[in-house]
Amino acid sequence: MTVTIMGATGHLGGLVVGALLARGQSASEIIAVGRDESRLVALGALGVSARRADYDAPESVDDAVAGADTVLLISATDVGRRFAQHRAVIDAAQRAGVTRLVYTSVVNAGTATTILAAEHRQTEEYLRSAGLEYVVLRNGWYHENFTDQIPGYLERGIVGSGGAGRISGAARADYADAAAAVLTGPWPGSRTFELGGPAYTLTDVAAEISQQTGDEVRYVDLPAEVYQGILESAGLAAPVAAMLADEDVGLASGALFVDGTDLGDLIGRPPTTLAHAVAQAVAGGGHAR
Ligand SMILES: NC(=O)c1ccc[n+]([C@@H]2O[C@H](COP(=O)([O-])OP(=O)(O)OC[C@H]3O[C@@H](n4cnc5c(N)ncnc54)[C@H](OP(=O)(O)O)[C@@H]3O)[C@@H](O)[C@H]2O)c1
């Protein structure tokens, strides 16, 4: 059963390829797709087939999905253009006679009112009406969204508008393993999984980093328009700053909270805790006390 990974050159996609191999999928039955030639060469060195495609060039997508039984579509990055790009991949998969498509969405995509959730919801609706068998993996927040920023947090603290909203975060590697479990395991039928780990707040993130580094980091909650202004003055484009502030408003009202065990059930172990992710980042970045 040949599996094609769209977005394999990204962080999550690379981990999915590794998780597929770890779960016994033969390298000769993995097709890794992305735009970045150098990363495709690195993936090819693992023995998998590497193909270049850009969702904005439909013929390249047709070539990429040719011969696949199952396609994993990892959501793309161009916010505002993603639905059209995802639709291009779903259409190409149908033309190629692909049986199953697995899509990485975002938690609570069915109900969240955030800017980020809208294109995921559109993609899910399109996929459900397309006639392919599908699995939607609604991924929660990555711990790495926070752990990658530890040096900045140690300098400036954490600001945001997430209030006491709870984040059911997990490591990218957990979500990658969940995708690999679906792609290699018994097909669960067309269904949607809400994936996340034990919940924490932004105040908990600050406390965990403080505890593990010995330097006090505080979380300061701000009105969304003030937070957006800070992001813009830090150099972010206005639409990106608006989207991040909007995501925090969603966080405050529960958009990133998952009350379920889908992730642990799929991967067969508890998801990585925030404490573990911070410990790894602190050890790797030399921030330990
Ligand atoms: N849950 C979370 O916390 C969270 C956080 C951030 C993002 N996300 C979402 O999750 C996805 C995966 O996360 P990630 O960390 O792996 O992101 P990433 O490292 O940026 O990977 C995104 C992948 O999508 C590919 N891609 C984007 N636009 C494309 C296009 N037009 N044609 C072909 N390929 C395209 C990229 O190719 P290139 O390498 O050529 O760019 C890359 O392989 C993201 O794309 C985003 O939708 C989730």
Image (cartoon, grey):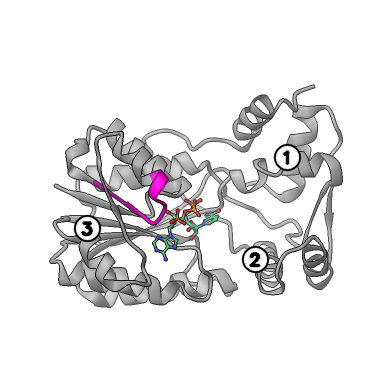
Where is mark 2, residue-wise? 247
The quadrant of the image that shows the C terminus is top right
Residue 266: tell me if it is visible.
Answer: no
Q: Magenta segment range?
A: 31-39
* Left or right, residue 34 beside residue 80: left
In the image, residue 156 sits, relative to residue 79, either above or below, namely above
Instruction: Specify which label sits upstream in the sequence, 2 or 3.
Output: 3
Please give the count of numbered marks on the rendered protein: 3
Residue at position x 30%, y 34% from top? Answer: 46
Instruction: Specify which label sits upstream in the sequence, 3 or 1.
Output: 1
Q: Are marks 2 and 3 in contact (CB under 8 Å)?
A: no
* Left or right, residue 172 beside residue 181: right
Where is mark 3, residue-wise? 189
The image position of residue 187, as x and y in percent, is 20, 51
Q: Is mark 3 within 8 Å of ligand 1?
A: no
The image position of residue 102, as x and y in percent, is 30, 58
* Left or right, residue 223 beside residue 114: right
Dot 2: few (<14), some (14–19), or many (≥20) neighbours within 10 Å? many
**Spatial CA span between label 2 and label 3:** 31 Å
Does the magenta run of residues contain 227? no
Discs 2/3, front: 2
Q: Are marks 3 and 1 in contact (CB under 8 Å)?
A: no
Residue type at mark 3: give it.
Gly
The image position of residue 91, as x and y in percent, is 25, 74
Where is mark 1, residue-wise? 150
Residue type at mark 2: give it.
Glu
**Spatial CA span between label 1 and label 2:** 20 Å
The image position of residue 24, as x and y in percent, is 23, 32
The residue tagged with tag 1: helix, strand or loop?
Answer: helix
Discs 3/1, front: 1
In the image, residue 182 sits, relative to residue 55, either above or below, namely above
Q: Are marks 1 and 2 in contact (CB under 8 Å)?
A: no
